[in-house]
Image (cartoon, rainbow, N blue to C red):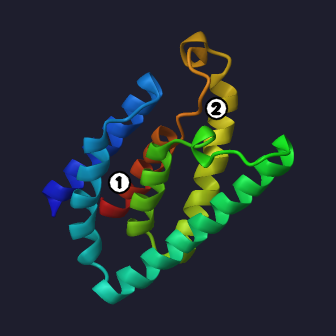
Amino acid sequence: MLAFSILAAVLLLCIGYEDFAHRTVKLVWYLLLPAALLPLRFSHVTFEEFGISFLMNIAYMVLLLSVALGVLYVRHKRMVSPLSSIGLGDILFFAILAMWFDTPSFIIFISLSLIVALVAHTLLQRFSFYRRHQTVPLAGMQSLCFLVIFLTSVI
């Protein structure tokens, strides 16, 4: 299990680095991360518990993204593509996070990591290296938040 933990930590660092540096993340990191996390997750929960938590977490994300789209609709007075405001990589990372957490922990993590991302984005706007890109590296910021929680849970 140590190998899966190390692999997951390295992958989270890769996602964080690439998203900050390039505002894009290679698909391979998103494909390898569940392969590293799922064996660790199944060592603590049954398949049934995993399935229920995963589906509830996905339902929460659909609700959250629907509310965000509603806000964008009201703001722009027209339907806006969800991918114009949030990247596909961010959505994939949400799905990966949904595999790891039970539902209450998922809701807390998503809420707190979005707040951390907003504060970090606001603070980092002062630096020219960060302002090169107009987008927020949400998956990168959340991967670093998750890395902190992941490391504290496996150590």
- Give the amino acid at mark 2: His
Q: Is residue 98 left or right of residue 72?
A: left
Task: Give the label, 2 or 1, closer to the camera.
Answer: 2
User: Total number of numbered labels?
Assistant: 2
Identify the image quadrant of the C terminus.
Answer: bottom left
Identify the image quadrant of the N terminus.
Answer: bottom left
Instruction: Farthest residue to the front: give it.
Output: 78
Q: Is residue 67 left or right of residue 107?
A: right
Q: Is residue 118 left or right of residue 9?
A: right
Question: At which x and y percent is residue 37?
Answer: 27, 61
- Give the amino acid at mark 1: Leu
Question: At which x and y percent is residue 118?
Answer: 67, 40
| Element class at badge 2 | helix
User: Residue placed at 38% from the left, 30% from the top?
Assistant: 17
Vertical placement of residue 143 versus 132, above or below: below
User: Residue placed at 57% from the left, 64% from the top?
Assistant: 61
Question: At which x and y percent is residue 136?
Answer: 59, 33
Is residue 46 among what the camera can see?
no
Residue marked by disc 1: 151
Question: At which x and y percent is residue 30?
Answer: 32, 48
Is residue 141 among what the camera can see?
yes
Residue marked by disc 2: 121
| Element class at badge 1 | helix
Examine the image and state in which quarter residue 65 appears.
bottom right
